[in-house]
Image (cartoon, helix red, strand yellow):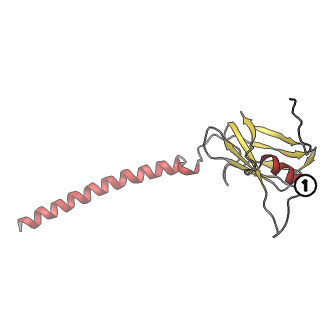
Amino acid sequence: MSNLSVVGRGCHARLQFLREWQGIWSACLLALLLGGGCSGSNSKTVPVSGVVLVDGKPVAGVTLLFNPVAGGRGSTGFTDAAGQFELRYNKDIRGALPGQHQVTFSWSQDEPGQEPTELQAVVLALHSEDSGNPYEVEVVGPVRGLALEFSSQPSVSAE
């Protein structure tokens, strides 16, 4: 009988230990969720919006990806019919992290076999992920009206 009481006390002690740690783990999980965790909700983003132009004409239907050079989550935007975009850090947070960014562009076809427009093709040839030539932008604070302007004419370098 004495063996049973020892085992019983040992189980009780283990249960008590697990209950104490359960409270600690619950508090840690709650702090992680409220503090942002993986979602980055506590990030210090700044609003960024602007327009994408080729030869002064708006480029509609391209996706922009702003990747922070220092690391961290990137932001995305999509150009409307007027070539205008607003960056989103995630579905709930607008903007981008401050700092230097490498910007790449992408395009998705709406229908099978669809080709990008002439203006979209210029931007994609210059600064898509496949081009290996990201566009550089520095975000130091809120940016409204950022003009990303490109030329369809090849640049001539002085040699």
x 16%, y 64%: residue: 8
- For disc 1, the marked residue is 118
- Screen quadrant of the N terminus: bottom left
Residue type, label 1: Glu
Tell me if mark 1 has few (under 14), some (14-19) or many (20+) residues whose alpha carbon lies within 10 angstroms of its own: few
x 73%, y 46%: residue: 132
Image side of residue 120 versus residue 70, left or right? right
Instruction: Give the SS element for disc 1.
Output: helix
- Residue 109 in percent (x, y) is at 80, 64
Identify the residue at the far front of this view: 159
Q: How many marks?
A: 1
x 16%, y 60%: residue: 9
- Residue 68 in percent (x, y) is at 66, 41
- Above or below, comparing residue 77 to residue 135 in the picture: below
- Residue 133 in percent (x, y) is at 75, 43
- Screen quadrant of the C terminus: top right
Image side of residue 49 versus residue 155, left or right? left
- Residue 130 in percent (x, y) is at 73, 51
Identify the residue at the far left of this view: 2
20 and 155: which is toward the camera: 155
